[in-house]
Amino acid sequence: MYKIVKKEKLAEGIYSFDIEERAIAKKALPGQFIILIVDENGERIPLTICDIDRDRGLVNIVVQGLGASTKKLFAMEVGDCLENFLGPLGLPSKFVEEDLENLRKKKFLLVAGGLGTAPLLPQAKWLHENKIAFDVILGARSKDLVILEDKFKDLADELLICTDDGSYGLHGLVTDGIDEMIKRGKTYDQCISIGPMIMMKFVCLKTKDLNIPTVVSMNPIMVDGTGMCGACRLRVGGQTKFACVDGPEFDGHQVDFSEAMRRMSLYKAQEEEKNHDYCDLAGGIKID
């Protein structure tokens, strides 16, 4: 069993959990994910790792309560144990295997939206620890949904917050944030973007125009997490790939986002039905 040793509310409907799992903490690298199963009747939930504490053997995940399984997780408290916690899975970010001297000649731009802020943190920490320059753009619908700002502020050369409603930082989308950075005279050799599918699509359209190579994480379309179910199948450069075993990171300028978004919509009806059933079992209690 895998003990929850810390639970923290980051924003409405978003929680951070530290899970005790020394083997994963020892091996995990930026870009990789875990599969979580809440109880013996639970479904598999693939989640990209947010942070690790190798010394204490802890793995940090950040979860948004959208479906029945995540709401079950939110009902758990410190000291409770998960049924299963598997990983690290997927391929690590390619830059961890690149020559450090070459990487230190580059300037990175990290762009995240919504919950995508969490899996971007290991990338930022690794770049910072290896003395590689990077700026960060974080996007959220409003100020109260901005998460992990302080951690990124301590790591990045420059941090820009964008909110859809203008309640904090730059009033606009993360693509407006990219425009703002370029207006300031910034130049970038590589972009890494994680967030909602539609956000990553438009970030890639923007960076393609700017001739900035861009890597995206296709974790939003994963279901089984082992390559067996085929739900995370996508087209990259005209070839069929599976996000969970061939990724989750891919060349964003080669990803067929339209097909990927259609695939995501296939499971909405089933998720809504499960969510409805869970709310009935929970007596209509809202867990936020």
Image (cartoon, grey):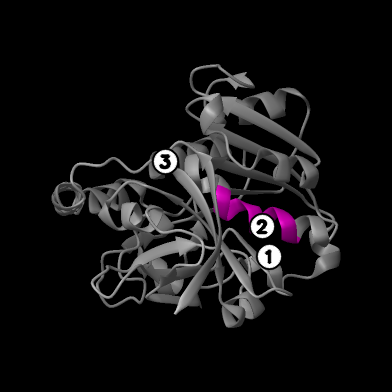
Which quadrant is home to the N terminus? Answer: bottom left
Above/below status of 88 relative to 131: below
Q: Decide which of 57, 46 is in the foreground and name it.
A: 57
Q: Which residues are magenta?
A: 118-126
Q: In the visual, does 234 lie left or right of 86?
A: left
Mark 1 = which residue?
A: 95
Regarding residue 226, the answer to whether it shows in the image is yes
Mark 1 falls on what kind of element?
A: helix
Tell me which amino acid carries mark 1.
Phe
Mark 2 falls on what kind of element?
A: helix
Regarding residue 214, the answer to whether it shows in the image is no
Mark 3 = which residue?
A: 13
Residue 84, label in figure: none
Mark 2 = which residue?
A: 123
Tell me which amino acid carries mark 2.
Gln
Whether residue 33 is in magenta: the answer is: no
Whichever of callouts 2 and 1 sits on the residue coming sooner in the sequence is: 1
C-alpha gap between disc 2 and disc 1: 9 Å
C-alpha gap between disc 3 and disc 1: 32 Å
The residue under the point 58% across, 70% down is 92
Which-is-in-front pick, marks 3 and 2? Answer: 3
The residue carrying pointer 1 sits among few (fewer than 14), some (14 to 19) or many (20 or more) residues within 10 Å by Cα, namely: few
